[in-house]
Image (cartoon, rainbow, N blue to C red):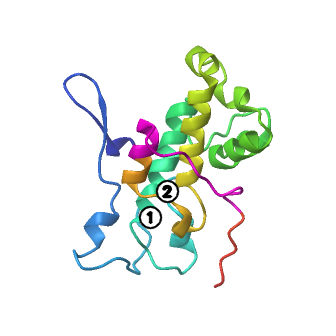
Amino acid sequence: MPQNVLLDEGLTAKIADFGIAKLLRKDQTQTTIKIRGTRGYVAPEWFRNMPITVKVDMYSFGILLLELICCRKSCKQDVANENEMILAEWSCDCYRRKELHLLAGDDEEAVEDIEMFKKLLMVAIWCIQENPALRPSMKKVMLTLEGSVEVSIHPDPFSFICSV
């Protein structure tokens, strides 16, 4: 996924295309093809015989956002507690238990502005909903980050039961 984050001349990060846009024609909203993407960033629908839509890119963006705000990779082997291995699952658990300080770790900025950290975390969780229909559009994410729209997330991102 690092290849999808580009830096401009001022070292400002720019998010590049996550890939699904290249797979769809202009008049197409979904497709069914073999899995494409970087392990750890691939949306669950790739594995569930579900239609592939632009929402797979929102999932990838959500994982990337989690990595950025938690200052760690999406999958980490060398952790004291095995519940912390998968960042997406651990972050949702910490959010449910209201233990955001565990995710913030040693990041003083995050600890000092825990409300902003919480908002970013909620946006990331919103983007990684297992049900693609519950994931926001990038426009809605931008409006949320700007403060124009409130974050609205499903209570449990991993409660989606896929009927195969």
What is the x, y in percent for residue 9? 19, 24
What is the x, y in percent for residue 15? 33, 43
Tell me if residue 8 can be seen. yes
Q: Is residue 155 magenta?
A: yes
Lateral position of residue 4 relative to residue 66, left or right:
left
Residue 55's tag is: 1
Q: Which residue is mark 2?
A: 59
Residue shown at 42% from the left, 75% from the top: 34
Secondary structure type for disc 1: helix
Q: Amino acid at mark 1?
A: Lys
Magenta region, residue range: 142-158
The reply to whether discs 2 and 1 touch (Cβ–Cβ < 8 Å) is yes
Quadrant in the rendering for residue 147: top left
Q: Is residue 9 magenta?
A: no
What is the x, y in percent for residue 24? 28, 73
Position of the C terminus, as image quadrant, is: bottom right
